[in-house]
Amino acid sequence: MKNLLLSTLFCFCIAATYAQGTVPGTNAPDSAKSWTIHGQNTFLINQSSFSNWAAGGVNSVAANLTLDYDFNYKKGVWSWDNKVIAGYGISKQNGTGWRKNDDRLILNSLLGRQASKYWLYTFYTNFQTQFTKGYNYDGAGNRTLISAPFAPATLTFGPGFAYKRSDNFRINLSPAAARITIVQNDSLSSIGSFGVTPGSKSLFQFGASLDAYYKVKLVENIYFENILKLYSNYLKTPGNIYMDYTANIFMKVNKFVTVNAGLELISDPYTKVPVQRNGLTEYHSLLQTKQIFGAGLTYKF
């Protein structure tokens, strides 16, 4: 885990250093306006079909919808950057029925006061949850509930400072950040899911939080986006660091058609994933991975 964390952070820092010379600046805002609002709606679809195919294959179809909006305020020495991401996806293979492959609601807010050209005093807030129940499936198709709306939901907030080169490159560090994990589902809270005490509906942590964002134009019409979140709990095993790293590649075909690929890695010491071993269900903290690839329609504004 520590090697993975250090490798990810090292790669991100290298990318950030490169970004200082390559990240394009954002469009100059209208000086008469304090708010700038922009975003994109993306619908992706994947499909594969086989008939009398000698090598074999499984028919499948998947669809994903992502809404990604930015609401940014800037006036004098004050700035307030807000990002809202809502995503949901489903997939189906022969014999398995429909299952979700993406489910997230993310709210980020960064209030800043200019300290120097690129440095700010900040107050950071992040909220994450999901829309529907999630299940783990065994080889026989039996399912086990592992998540639900507001189970978990996490709220992280705290004062700190940030280095912001542009809207495409920023790093915020909160050395005194609170993190609250909420588990509203009774069956999940009763077994102590996501680190809560069995029967409790919440877990409080106090520690340090790092949030970083970097987006670069690789070549014409191809962009590479990185999002990194780290959290260390001072109150219990601070060396067990929570990590959430997302890498996205956006390839623009024309004004509305795009090809997107995404990879997300999560290492959470408080989240235990059910694993079947020798006919028994065991719960372990494992590296979580998610990959999405597809072509579809994107509307930007």
Image (tube, rainbow, N blue to C red):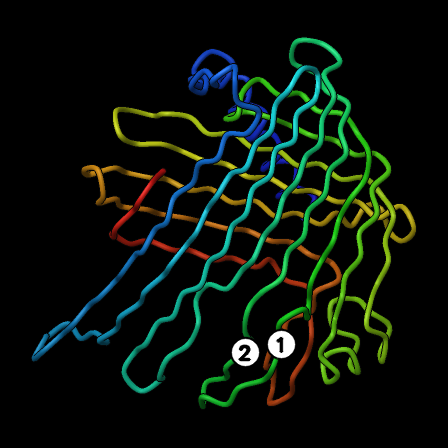
CA neighbours of label 2 inside 10 A, class few (<14), some (14 to 19), many (20+): some
**SS at mark 2?**
strand
Q: Residue at x 70, y 22 (%)?
A: 78
Q: Between 69 and 251, which is closer to the camera in this rendering?
A: 69
**SS at mark 1?**
strand
Q: Residue at x 28, y 38 (%)?
A: 251
- Disc 2 from disc 1: Cα separation: 7 Å
As drawn, the residue found furthest toward the left would be 52
Q: Residue at x 60, y 90 (%)?
A: 279
User: What quarter of the picture does the C terminus occupy?
Assistant: top left
Labelled disc at residue 165: none
- Determine whether 211 is above or below 147 in the image: above
Badge 2 amino acid: Asn
- Determine whether 68 is above or below 226 in the image: below
Q: Between 155 and 190, which is closer to the camera in this rendering?
A: 155
Do callouts 2 and 1 mark residues in contact (Cβ within 8 Å)? yes
Which residue position holds label 2?
A: 136
Labelled disc at residue 146: 1
- Determine whether 116 is above or below 113 in the image: above
- Determine whether 6 is above or below 168 in the image: below
Mark positioned earlier in the residue sequence (2 or 1): 2
Badge 1 amino acid: Ile
49 sits left or right of 27 in the view: left
- The image shows residue 104 at horizontal and vertical percentages of 54, 60
